[in-house]
Amino acid sequence: MKNVIGGLLAPFSETMFSMVNAIPLGVVRVLVFGILLALALWVINMSPQMPETGEGKSYSIFRDLRFFAIGVLILQAALYILF
């Protein structure tokens, strides 16, 4: 039974494998970094997101959650470059 199912799926898997290998790695990198850049621009354009506190409403870059979101996107890009 396994051989029958494997025989039926072999042409499909070979086609998919050849399609994936036809995409240049440079295009994939541009797409990934483009998506991360688009997310970063979207986060920057959002209104400041601050945790609620009962005290004064002073603005600090370290209290703005957008700062940490940009940091996570940079970390993801760095991990993609390394691995």
Image (spheres, grey):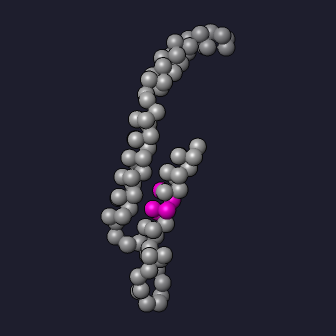
Q: From which residue to which does the magenta span run?
A: 69-73
Is 64 situated above or below 36? below
Residue at x 52%, y 16% (from the top left corner)? 14
Is 30 situated above or below 21? below
Is 64 situated above or below 56? above
Q: Quadrant of the N terminus?
A: top right
Instruction: Choose between 52 and 37: the one closer to the eye.
Output: 37
Residue 17 horizontal side relative to residue 23, left or right = right
Residue at x 41%, y 86% (from the top left corner)? 57
Residue at x 35%, y 58% (from the top left corner)? 41
Residue at x 34%, y 70% (from the top left corner)? 47
Question: Can residue 45 be found in the magenta stretch?
Answer: no
Residue 45: % across, % down: 32, 64
Residue 72: % across, % down: 51, 59
Secondary structure predominantly adopted by residues drawn in magenta? helix
Residue 66: % across, % down: 43, 67
Question: Can residue 70 be found in the magenta stretch?
Answer: yes
Is 23 situated above or below 70? above
Evaluate whether residue 30 shows in this view: yes
Instruction: Choose between 45 and 53: the one closer to the eye.
Output: 45
Quarter location, residue 24: top left
Residue 3 horizontal side relative to residue 35, left or right = right
